[in-house]
Amino acid sequence: MGLQYPKTIEEALHNIRESDGYNDQSTDLFVDLFSKIRPIFYGDYQKAEKSLWQLITALKEDPALLRKLRYLFAKIIRDSEILEVFTSSGIETESSFFVELASRIKHKILPVHRNEKSLLRIIDTIFYKSTDIRWIEKIDPKLWVEFFSLLKLRLNFSDKQMLEKFNRALHIISCKIVSLGMNKEIREWLTEEEISIFINQNRYSQNLINFAEHSQVVEEKYNIIKSELRRSLKDCDEAVVRLKTESVQVGTSLQQTYLLKQIRQLIARMLIILDLADRGEAVDLLFMVQSFQGIVRNENTKNSLTGLIRSDIQVLAYRIADHEHDTGEHYITTTRKEYFIMLKSAMGGGVFAALMAVIKGFLHKIVMAPFWQGFCYSLNYSLGFVGIHLTGSTLATKQPAMTASAIASAMDSNKEKKSMSHLAILLSKVWRSQTASFVGNLSITFPVALLISFLYYLIFGLNIVEGKHAQELLDWQNPLKSNCLSYAFNTGVFLFLSGLVTGYFDNRVIHGKIIQRIEEHAFLNRFFRKENIHKFAAYIGKNLGPVAGNVFLGFCLGMAAFFGYIFGIDFDIRHITISTGQFAIGLQGLGYHVGSLDLIMTIVGVLLIGFLNFLVSFSLAFITASISRGVKFSQYKNLFTYLRRLLFRYPMDFIYPPKVERQPDDLLKKHF
């Protein structure tokens, strides 16, 4: 008689009692059993605990049922292939991050095929829901210990078959470690001694395997070889940790980050196998429960995209954010002298912004296909942004992405109460520096653009823009007549991304040894003097990141409307300084005949555009930098208290620097 699908845990246990144990029903019986333990909602782990306790009680009260369950469980373990558990579960197996990412996407759609006898396939079949690990880990470990103690599972590494699987797993993992360690992304950063360590661990591993295969094993000698292998693995791990630590100074790449994580996973797995071998049959039940949970977790998350991206991108994001932090410190003013330097620098940026707005007005007059018009706009913006950088000028909207990383860095390194007051003072410095750059940009952009438009009219008798297009330039900045605020949001995203591009290329300059490669370039050394090549290399090293970021930003802003056009969506950008310049040109083109409401709403629109540019780019950069540094915001709940105290006591600090730099003690006092 066939077994019925169980509706309750009692029916699942009844099916186990009725099974003959000699067919292939073992896995199906466990699938049915755990389907009754699994809660409907994974958060309801109390229901799972109650069901597991019900199962344990039933097994204790029915010796025949317990014997049958032990037999079925042992049959699964005995007949299954466990090599994959050691060599692949929880270990990324592809050659690079993007190959691994593509593999996970593919396997989410169409799961990987596994041998029918694979233990991982059986675990996947039983715990098929990706949320299973959540309720499994919530259940009291003591219940799992009691459950496994009833099953009496033993891993006997003195057994010849088990020893063979153990040795094979060691060999496979050891070879993988050598292969990954000799990858160019890793090898060229290792010392000669560390390269030898990676090779030696494979030799020790092979010696251990060869020694174990002999019928006459001398226990003392075997343990010596095993301890040498364990020490060599720990040396390999120390080398990997050194590379991860030094990446802060020498940069990193996504490929290197991925490989380092993979090597550490393999080393940890080898040490677990050696630990299991040392235990022999004396595997403690808590360790077994942790191993069981680990395997289920690995299988539930094996195709997780967020897990892969979070773990591998974090180190690279930290490095990129760290470069932004280094740059961001230059945008934070402390003294009045620095404040006025920032103001002057921002005025220079305002001149470039006015010129970009004027040139765009001329470009609009030229009839071009949408792509080429967007391309010309992009060149105009890119050259303008690069000019701002190369002349040492400042663009207000470039600051937020950089200063956000500096703030996140301060949060990362300060955790005491006194640090909250220090951080509040830092935020006031960032705010007034940002205010100075906005004032500097706008105070020059508007009058310069207006002056150029006026002079052009005096000389040629024509306006740069006029008629319908002149009115459009005002309407584009008016929130009542356009979607300028959503476009300003888009611009904030592009400003954030340009900061990442800058940080990425700054990182590549160091990690890719760009300066050294230029200095050693054979062609350059044939025609130029060493000191000139050195200066050129240093200049490229200093400016490659900012130039790349500015060119990227220019093309994002210039091509935005084109992509909105070809995809048939309402997509464009609004950048505060360029919008200010266009406002001035449009005003001149209309002969200053603008209604009061239109004039007021256009001014309000420009200011809101600037606010959204700042808010979006700052927020995204701050979140990215904070995540990459592992900042826990719960530690900073008192920050707003100190900010409020600073605002009420010293409101001018947010606009203009005090004569004497504010100290944390000024905020720690409860009263004046």
Image (cartoon, helix red, strand yellow):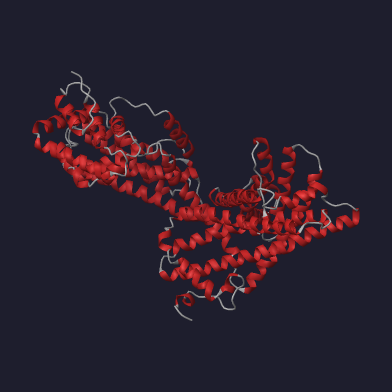
Up-down relation of residue 300 to residue 499 (above or below) = above
In which image quadrant can residue 324 be found? bottom right
Q: Quadrant of the N terminus?
A: top left
Q: Name above or below for residue 473 compared with residue 112.
A: below
- Residue at screen point 19% across, 29% down: 11
Residue 329 location (% of width, % of height):
57, 63
Say which of 45 and 307 sits in front: 45
The residue shown at (49%, 67%) is 423
Q: Quadrant of residue 390?
A: bottom right
- How far from the left and from the top, in percent, is residue 611? 61, 58
**Is residue 510 something one can see in this rendering?**
yes
What is the number of callouts on the image? 0
- Point out residue 9 in the picture as x, y percentages from the top left corner: 20, 33
Q: Position of residue 60 (x, y in %)?
A: 11, 38
What's the residue at 82%, 48% (across, down)? 467
- 536 left or right, relative to 78: right
| Residue at the limit of the structure toward the bottom, as seen here | 672
Q: For the view shown, which residue lies furthest in the top direction? A: 1
Does the image show residue 325? Answer: no
Q: Is residue 448 left or right of residue 563?
A: right
Q: Work out whether residue 255 or residue 415 is closer to the camera in this orientation and state it.
A: 415
Q: Is residue 458 left or right of residue 18?
A: right
